[in-house]
Amino acid sequence: MAKIVSLKEAVAENIRDGDTVAMEGFTHLIPYAAGHEVIRQGKKDLYLIRMTPDILYDQLIGVGAARGMKFSWGGNPGVGSLHRFRDAVENQWPRPLEIEEHSHAAMANAYEAGAANLPFATLRGYIGADLPKVNLNIKSVTCPFTGEVLAAVPAIRPDVTIIHALRADRRGNVLLEGIVGVQKEAVLAARRSIVTVEEIVDDLNPPSPNSVVLPSWAVTVVALVPGGAFPSYAQGYYPRSNTFYIAWDEIARDRDVFQKWINENVMQASPEDFAKHAKKA
C-alpha cells in the first residue's frame, strides 16, 4: 500500500545512484518538482527514460545526473532544441551521454510489456526506417501463427517511475484525468514509484470518463506537491506556461547561464515553492 510522505523523503528512500528512472507525463502533468528534488539530492549516474524528453530532462542532463537516456523525440516543444542535451551528445559536457532512440509506438508498447512482466514488446513498425540500423535493441520476430514479420523491442522495467497526478486519497489511490500518456503503464512497469499530487482528498469521486485510477497497491509513495507540474499544466488547476518554455531556450544555450539558473531556482529552492503556481484554473 502506498505511503504518504514528503517529496524529500520519497526521493531519498526510493532513488539510488545508478538507477533507471522514468519520469512520464505527456505535455500534461510533467513531474518537475520531483525532478528538481532529484537534482537537489545530488543523485547521479541515472539512466533516464521518457517518451518525450523536454526541458526537465535538459536540466537533469545539464547538471550531470544522467549517464544515458532512452527516448522517442527530444526537444523544447514549440520552441526548438534541448541545448543541454545537445551539448552532452555533441561535446560530452558535463559528461558523455549514452542514448537509445525509439519511436513513440515502440516506447508505448515497451512500457506495456514491462507492466505485463513480459520480456519484450512486438509491434508493426520501423518498416523502411533507419533507426534499426543504429539501434541494436530493435529486432524482428516472426509470428508463429501468421508468418508476419514484426518489430520487437525490450520491455521497459524502470527501477523507479515518477509521475505527477491530480489527486490522491488518504489510502494512496491516485487519480489522473486529461491527457494521461503512458503514466499508468510506466508505474505498473516499475519496481518502485513516486507520485506527486496537487491534492490529497477523502474521496476521489466523481472521476471523468477518461480518468485513470492507480490503486494504492500499485504505488510506492505519494507526496503532496501543489503546483508540482509547473511549467507544464495540470488540468483544472493551472495552465501551461508557454512563456517559460520560450525563456528556457536562452537559459539553456549558455553553460554559465544555465548553471546560475539551476543554483538560484533549484538548489536554493524547495518543493513548497511550486505552490505559488497551484491556483485553480
Image (cartoon, helix red, strand yellow):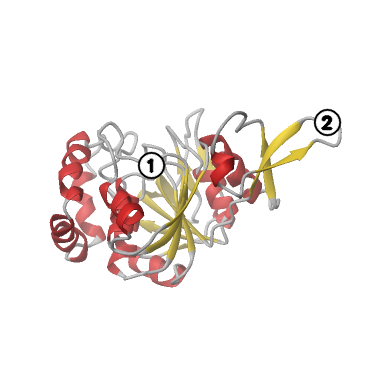
Q: Looking at the image, do the residues carrying marks 2 and 1 touch, with CB atoms under 8 Å apart?
A: no
Q: Which residue is mark 1?
A: 74
What residue type is disc 1 on? Gly
Q: Alpha-carbon distance for marks 2 and 1?
A: 35 Å
Q: Residue at x 32, y 71 (%)?
A: 42
Q: Nearer the viewer, residue 42 or 232?
A: 42
User: What residue does disc 2 label?
Assistant: 147
The spot of residue 136 in percent (x, y) is 60, 49
Residue density around tag 2, few if under 14, some if 14–19, many if 20 or more, within 10 Å = few
Q: Secondary structure at mark 1?
A: loop
147 relative position to 126: left or right: right
Q: Residue at x 58, y 46 (%)?
A: 111
User: On screen, 96 above or below 78?
Assistant: below
- Position of residue 106 measured from the top left corner of the image (x, y, whole percent): 58, 39
Q: Could you say which quadrant of the image residue 29 lies in?
A: top left
Report helix, strand or loop for mark 2: loop
Residue 124: horizontal and vertical position, in percent?
66, 30
Toward the right, the furthest residue is 145
At 32% from the left edge and 51% from the top edge, which residue is drawn? 85
In the image, 47 versus 228, the foreground residue is: 47
Residue depicted at 47% across the width and 34% down the height: 206
Q: Quadrant of residue 92?
A: bottom left
Vertical position of residue 84 compared to residue 122: above or below = below
Q: Residue 51: x and y, percent?
A: 46, 43
Can you say whether 268 is above or below 74 in the image? below
**Where's the N terminus, which quadrant?**
bottom right
Q: Is residue 147 left or right of residue 238?
A: right
Q: Compare residues 279 and 101 and report the one nearer the observer.
A: 101
Task: Of the two numbered discs 2 and 1 on the same chain, state the one appearing first in sequence.
Answer: 1
Instruction: Indicate the amino acid at tag 2.
Output: Gly
Label 1, residues with CA under 10 Å away: few <14, some 14-19, many ≥20:
many
For the C terminus, the quadrant is: top left
